[in-house]
Amino acid sequence: MIVYTSSLIILLSILISIFNGRANKNAYLLSAYFIIFSIYPLTYHFSFFSTNDFLLAIIFYQFSPLYFVAGPLLYFYIKGTLRDKIEWKWIHLFHLLPFIVSFINVIPYLFSSFSHKLEFAHLIHQNTENLKKLEYNWFIPKTTGLILRPISVGIYIIASFYQIYRAIKYYRQENRQFQLIIRWLSLLLIISTAFMFVYGYAGNIARQNDIKTTFSIIEKINFIIGGVFIVFPISMLMFPQILYGIPIHEKVRSNKPLKENLSTKKYIEQSNKNHEAFKMLSNRIIEYFDNEMPYLKQDFSLTELAAALNCPQHHISYCFSDFLEISFTKLRATRRVEHAKSLLLKGVTKKYSMEKVGAMSGFSSRSTFFSTFKEYTGLTPSEFIEASNEI
């Protein structure tokens, strides 16, 4: 189970980076953490539960230095999510020191031939006790690394919990997005803590040269790990707003009054600067649609809207979900349909074809135009013209 779950999380992480990384840079940190987090149990699986020498040769010890990057990735993801920005300073490179030391330590194995790694894998599968005899480090014993990796991540987990505590205490926002993100980050840390405790405990037993007991522990918790692991992809599929983070938009770039018909029913009203800034941003979105009519371009997207308003894309998504009570795609579709209706009422079909009318309204094809038009009006364009002529 752990193989399928880990593979699913790795795939999901890649998709998050591709589709959400540009919108919210913190998504890159989360994806990288998930990938490293998924490789860790896979190593145990292919060491103890598989007889495939080839796969073990690929995964065994190749990624061990990356485990020391997991802690910083988790910490900076949580910190960046809570503050809605990634704060980068050159001093942060010191967080990579454990990774660098670990990388240097395993150079003898990393740069050995693949046939040599296959030999290692075969010996491990013959008898896991051979792990005691295999030497592939320069200066830090292999069993010591089994303890240092969970401890390293544990330190960053404690620091991350402190960041959440500070956010709740000093920056508390009474809105559903803040509450959702706090719960998500807490769940992420709790599950990460449980994993590090289990693998740290198993590593400590291995350090005492009791490989069989280590094997027994991992065997017993293998299915539990797989079951708990699946919480991550399920959470993000059920609550895609997790990827928005906690948008903080302090800059108000417009002096125009807010429109009274701007819907905020889904949002818990409160008078704070961030709330008012997002109401203003929501107003700017509507103004941009009204004045520029960007939806008439067939390739108009959320990314283009964010670029036009010079605003992070996840801020725009947050406005649509919590302030405007309508999705971007629905707003774009309704505006296109309204524009098409106005063209049809002007009698443009005497000069242009229906396909051309759809293209002038922003639709990419005749079929999309007809299906969307009927979805929002209950009539096809032709039926709409007939109905309007009868009035």
Image: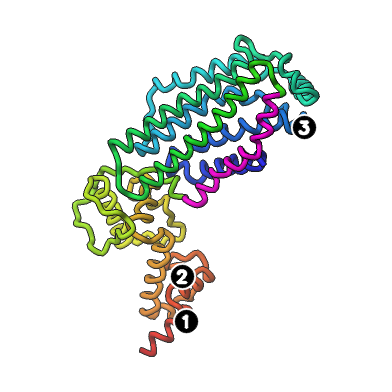
Residues at discs 1 and 3 in contact (Cβ within 8 Å): no
Horizontal side of 347 relative to 374 (left or right) equals left
Q: Quick check: is 219 in the magenta stretch?
A: yes
Q: Secondary structure at mark 2?
A: helix
Q: Determine which of the numbered discs, if any, sits on residue 382 in the image.
A: 1
Disc 2 to disc 3, C-alpha distance: 57 Å
Disc 1 to disc 3, C-alpha distance: 64 Å
Q: Residue at x 39, y 33 (%)?
A: 79
Looking at the picture, which amino acid does disc 3 mark?
A: Asn
Residue 386 vs 328, above or below: the answer is below
Mark nearer the viewer, 2 or 3: 3
1 or 3: tag closer to the N-terminus: 3
**Is residue 284 or residue 157 the one in the foreground?**
157
Q: Residues within 10 Å of mark 2 (few under 14, many from 20)?
A: many
Image quadrant for the N terminus? Answer: top right
Q: Residue at x 52, y 33 (%)?
A: 192
Residue 1 vs 75, above or below: the answer is below
**Is residue 260 or residue 339 the one in the foreground?**
260
Q: Determine which of the numbered discs, if any, sits on residue 358 in the image.
A: 2
Q: Is residue 115 visible?
A: no
Q: Which residues are magenta?
A: 213-239
Q: Residue at x 50, y 64 (%)?
A: 364
* Quadrant housing residue 267: bottom left
Q: Secondary structure at mark 1?
A: helix
Horizontal side of 207 relative to 354 (left or right) equals right
Looking at the picture, which amino acid does disc 1 mark?
A: Ser
* Quadrant housing residue 168: top left
Looking at the picture, which amino acid does disc 2 mark?
A: Gly
2 or 3: tag closer to the N-terminus: 3
Residue 47 vs 276, above or below: the answer is above
**Residue 4 placed where, x, y %?**
66, 42
Residue 47 vs 27, above or below: the answer is above
